[in-house]
């Protein structure tokens, strides 16, 4: 039996990424890669990690904490916050589209088409000749 141990201090971490193949995406595992400043390419790779996105985010939080970079009060990463915003915007869009479909079906509150507005404006215009 043998063991190969690598250690990289958080201060030296330059970039982290994760990847998931077809089956990894379906089954929730993948690889997490770590690159360091001054290194060439990937210095360390964690293979077949459950929930690689979470692992990558945990490493990024630790790196930022080591560097003294600000983070959100709840410990969420910017990606987490953006994902929440995107999810909320999609919900709003779905709600608005559903309301629009109901209004169109019932004929209530339907806005005139641009052509109707244009023709109404033309008929209301008076010319003094």
Image (cartoon, rainbow, N blue to C red):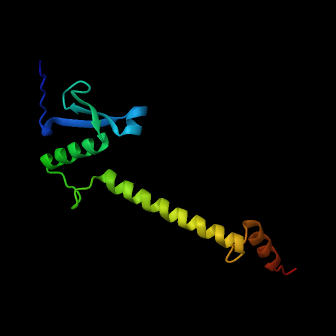
Residue sitting at x 72%, y 75%: 107
10 with respect to 93 (left or right):
left
77 above or below 33?
below
* Quarter of the view holding residue 1: top left
Residue sitting at x 21%, y 27%: 43
Residue sitting at x 73%, y 68%: 113
User: Looking at the picture, how far across and down is residue 59, in whole percent?
Assistant: 21, 42
| Residue at the far top in the pictured view | 1
8 above or below 102?
above
Residue sitting at x 33%, y 57%: 81
Q: Nearer the viewer, residue 73 or 39?
A: 73
124 above or below 61?
below
91 with respect to 104 (left or right):
left
User: Looking at the picture, how far across and down is residue 98, in whole percent?
Assistant: 59, 66
Q: Nearer the viewer, residue 102 or 66?
A: 102
For the C terminus, the image quarter is: bottom right
Q: Nearer the viewer, residue 91 or 69?
A: 91
14 with respect to 104 (left or right):
left
39 above or below 98?
above
User: Looking at the picture, how far across and down is residue 40, in whole percent?
Assistant: 23, 24
| Residue at the far front in the pictured view | 1
* Quarter of the view holding residue 71: bottom left
| Numbered circles on residues, count | 0
User: Looking at the picture, how far across and down is residue 117, in whole percent?
Assistant: 74, 72
| Residue at the far right in the pictured view | 129
């Amino acid at each position: 039996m043998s063991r190969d141990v690598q250690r990289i201090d958080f201060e030296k971490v330059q970039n982290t990424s994760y990847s998931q193949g077809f089956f990894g995406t379906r089954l929730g595992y993948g690889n997490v890669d770590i690159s360091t400043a001054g290194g060439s390419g990937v210095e360390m790779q964690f293979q077949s990690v459950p929930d690689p996105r979470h692992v990558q985010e945990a490493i990024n939080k630790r790196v930022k904490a080591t560097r003294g970079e600000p983070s959100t009060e709840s410990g969420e990463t910017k990606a987490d916050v953006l994902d929440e915003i995107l999810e909320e915007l999609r919900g709003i869009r779905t709600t608005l589209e559903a309301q629009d479909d109901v209004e169109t079906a019932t004929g209530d509150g339907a806005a005139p088409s641009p052509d109707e507005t244009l023709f109404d404006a033309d008929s209301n215009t008076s010319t003094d000749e």
